[in-house]
Image (cartoon, helix red, strand yellow):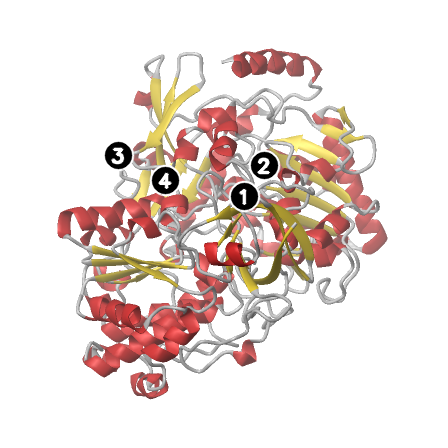
Amino acid sequence: MPFVNYLDVRHFALLAISHMQYRKSMNVATPISAKAVTDANRVGHTVCPHDCPSACALEVDINADGRIGRVRGANANTYTAGVICAKVARYSERIYHPGRLLTPKRRKGAKGAGDWQEIGWDDALDEIANAFIKAEAAHGAEAVWPYFYAGTMGQVQRDSIERLRHAKKYSGFFGSICTNMAWTGYVMGTGALRGPDPREMAKADVVVIWGTNAVATQVNVMAHAVKARKERGAKIVVVDIYDNPTMKQADMKLVVRPGTDAALACAVMHIAFRDGYADRAYMAKFADDPAGLEAHLASKTPQWAADITGLSVEEIEAFARLVGTTKKSFFRLGYGFARQRNGAVAMHAALSIATVLGSWQYEGGGAFHNNGDIFRLNKAELMGTAYADPNVRQLDQSQVGRILTGDTEALRGGGPVTAMLIQNTNPANVCPEQRLVSQGFHREDLFIAVHEQFMTETAEIADIVLPATMFLEHDDLYRAGGQNHILLGPKLVEPPETVRTNLFVIEELAKRLGVDHMTGFGLSEREHVETILQASGWGSFDNLAEEKWIDAQPEFEVAHYLQGFGYGDGKFRFSPDWQNGPSPNKPPKNVGVMGPADAFPKFPDQVDVIETVDAEHPFRLATSPARNFLNSTFAETKTSVQKEGRPELMISPVDALRLDIAEGDVVQIGNARGDVRIHAKIVEGSRPGVLIAEGLWPNKAHLDGEGINVLTGADAVAPYGGAAFHDNKVWLKKA
């Protein structure tokens, strides 16, 4: 292919201008086993690094020229089971992309003007360090804000930035944007972030896929659910807000209004108590207040829920009857339905159904969301937690726009942020309140260094851009929230000579900033992995290299909470403490409870803290994921863009007819945060009053250069923060 030849020539040219000897000892290629490298053409074993609960185990063909070929799921891994998404299967298109960043660059003209000068690595790192020193001298260490997220889920390459932050006492990073409402709602019930073996979906008689478009975002979930249907005659129920590809696979489809999932859950539990499906003996042993819950649910009738959700009474009754009469009902609870301002309550309500029914007692039953607690990875040295200062302010990732535009509350009463290092994320595209984000990033007094694989929209407004390795080009350790394995991702191919790992950048900045003598610095990727594994009781790097992965799933009784839930008394909480209860990502004490937590109910209920429609904003907008993108990743690859087409807004035929909107028309949507022009897509089966914008397209792919996150809000979501991406009231008109 022509672009491969282009890269070959480019690499040699860049090598000639590189002024810095790359310390390859930091990242020596590590074959997964000695046997794997005996042939000129070999198969390498690794892990998909992207921000997805599946963390698929991969097999990668390595050609004789050292390039990757076919990428496929590992058959031997019992969760991946040979199945991966199409976008990762096309990874050669990404790693050899002609637009890949290959040299450090310094901004010459105005921010975002695209006027760059190529510079050497030493000069680039010197300038970043000098900018940080200057910011600290002027405003204190908290003026520097290292900013990162899950562009890689590799523990070493993602989290090493925290060690530099703690060593220098730079502003803290509260990573709220993705998981907080879902994790909090789940753990408020169970007391722990774990659940039944996710492979048990294949052993269920009913699989309820609630609030996740698994066909597009977690293909393995769908594979195990379909296996249950094929081998056991299991029914697949899908609860979501529109007729997406997962809904099309369902035996029972429940299309609810956005933000009303808790009402459906309450009605299902009402019916369980009413019709004798509730397992009273189980609740007496394992739940805190089943009598209080039953009394509370007495008024939560199917008709009550129908009026709220838009479902019919018959649909609600049929769903409740199906799960109520099927012991092996597996509730696979996703993230999407929790990305509302009442998302934590919705997650807790849906989770509570499994406890009312006693589904946890059975193989193939219970409720699963994330397995984060089972891995027990000790990353203290990697992250430098020993020298973390609890008095340093914590800044909310989701509120980057407010922070950079001087909002006093968002800044926690402190001084301005005047310097940033950004790794593994693209906030200029992915964060809410995009107009504030853009305004903040374009400040002339703000120094920005971005370490990236492509010239993202965040990189385009940086002062220094550094080229980064991809996952096949470095060693790392992975764990999978949506499954049960710890996996090794070894370096399988050599990177371009002029790109560097995240760890390399952190190490070199530590030297220039005078903290490289502190514990945790000076180690290679392999040494960090070894330290984590041994400190966590999971063996050694060499053992993992031979075994490829570790099955960390606890025994059945633990996974199903049959020895008690995660609270001290072993009881599931129907009535959680929303202002003091547990969460895997609880804000620090100097932040405290966030959002209107005092409005949250004692028992599961519909709580209307969402952006409800009004006369000026009669529509609800959700910004759902697309099949061929992963957040903003893969929006740069040709095939993914071709398959997705263009930014479009899904509109009900009823609404389109009323507003005289035809397929392909340009429409305008807006709210108090801004407005966006976009093409209309008329979708049969869409719920009137609900608009869906699939896929996080680059801002510049939109008609006016502003993306869909112009319309999303960054107000803190109760009780512990988060971004309510699917909870927006908007107006709609033909442009």
User: Which badge, 3 or 1, comes first in the chain's sequence?
Assistant: 3
The residue labelled by disc 1 is 158
| Amino acid type, residue under disc 1 in the picture | Arg
The answer to whether residue 583 is visible is no
Q: Position of residue 148 (x, y in %)?
A: 60, 47
- The alpha-carbon separation of the residues under discs 2 and 1 comes to 7 Å
- The alpha-carbon separation of the residues under discs 3 and 2 comes to 30 Å
Q: Quadrant of residue 464?
A: top right
Q: Quadrant of residue 415?
A: bottom right
The residue labelled by disc 3 is 75
Seen in the image, is 265 located left or right of residue 183? Answer: left
Q: Residues within 10 Å of mark 2 (few under 14, many from 20)?
A: many
Which is in the foreground here, disc 3 or disc 2? 3
Q: Residues within 10 Å of mark 3 (few under 14, many from 20)?
A: some
Q: Residues within 10 Å of mark 1 (few under 14, many from 20)?
A: many
Residue shown at 49% from the left, 58% from the top: 179
Residue shown at 24% from the left, 73% from the top: 357
- The alpha-carbon separation of the residues under discs 3 and 1 comes to 27 Å
- The alpha-carbon separation of the residues under discs 1 and 4 comes to 18 Å
Q: Is residue 654 above or below residue 25?
A: below
User: Which badge, 4 or 3, comes first in the chain's sequence?
Assistant: 4
The residue labelled by disc 4 is 56
Residue shown at 33% from the left, 72% from the top: 352
Seen in the image, is 345 located left or right of residue 72? Answer: right
SS for callout 2: helix
Which is in the foreground here, disc 2 or disc 4? 4
SS for callout 1: helix
